[in-house]
Amino acid sequence: MASDREKKGDDRSSGGKRGFASMDQDKQREIASKGGKAAHEKGTAHEFDSEEAREAGSKGGKAAHEKGTAHEFDSDEARRAGSKGGKAAHEKGTAHQFDSEEAREAGRKGGESRGSGSSEDKSSHSSKGGTSGQHAKAGSQSHKHK
């Protein structure tokens, strides 16, 4: 004889979704958002410290990359995002203050990454940036006014 579950068409054993899980993602987000807002109003919401937030963000980023849904920044977007982060850190007073040795090392590493490639490519870049042709042009222009 069939059980009550079988009669009602309960499909949990076959992987069917019920209740909250069966709702579309927008509806789930809306309900979860209301719960989060209520918890903050009551003062029972979890407050992440910076380490927990960093760890959670890292997990989310890794999951998005594995699923192929992560946003890929172009160089201009990355530059703007970094600039915003740097400005915010300076406003909060949490920005790292480089000493002269750290600044020199960071500049050296940046120069290496700009000039990476074959040894022929590296010879066309000076430590000031730009190609040797650009430097020659700038040098000849600066001599015109003497």
Image: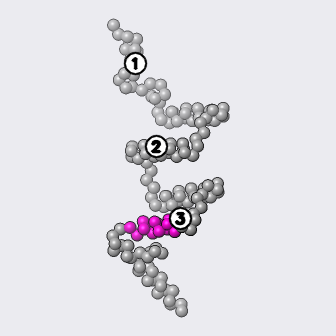
Q: Is residue 115 above or below residue 67?
A: below
Give the label on residue 102, or none: 3
The residues tagged by marks 3 and 1 sit, at their Cα atoms, a distance apart of 64 Å
**Could you tell which of marks 3 and 1 lies nearer the N-terminus?**
1
Residue 59 badge: 2
Which stretch is magenta? 104-116
How far apart, in angstroms, are the residues tagged by discs 3 and 2? Answer: 30 Å
Query: Residue 14 in the image: x percent, y percent?
Result: 35, 23
Dividing the picture into quadrants, the one containing residue 10 is top left
Counting every numbered tag in the picture gives 3
In front of the other: label 3 or label 2? 3
Question: Measured from the top left, where is residue 100 in percent x and y?
Answer: 56, 68
Identified by mark 2, the residue type is Lys
In the rendered image, the quadrant that contains the N terminus is top left
Residue 77 at x, y = what percent?
49, 58
Q: Which amino acid lies under the numbered mark 1 shown in the image of this protein? A: Asp
* Residue 103 position by quadrant: bottom right
According to the picture, the residue beneath numbered tag 1 turns out to be 10
Nearer to us of marks 2 and 1 is 2
Q: What kind of residue is marked 3?
A: Glu
Q: How is the image coloured?
A: one colour
Alpha carbon separation for disc pair 2 and 1: 34 Å
Q: How many residues crowd mark 1 within 10 Å: few (<14), some (14–19), many (20+)?
A: few
Residue 73 visible in image: yes
Q: Main secondary structure of the magenta part?
A: helix
Cβ atoms under marks 3 and 1 closer than 8 Å: no
What element does badge 3 sit on?
helix
Q: Secondary structure at mark 2?
A: helix
Tell whether label 1 touches label 2 (CB within 8 Å): no
Q: Is residue 91 left or right of residue 63?
A: right
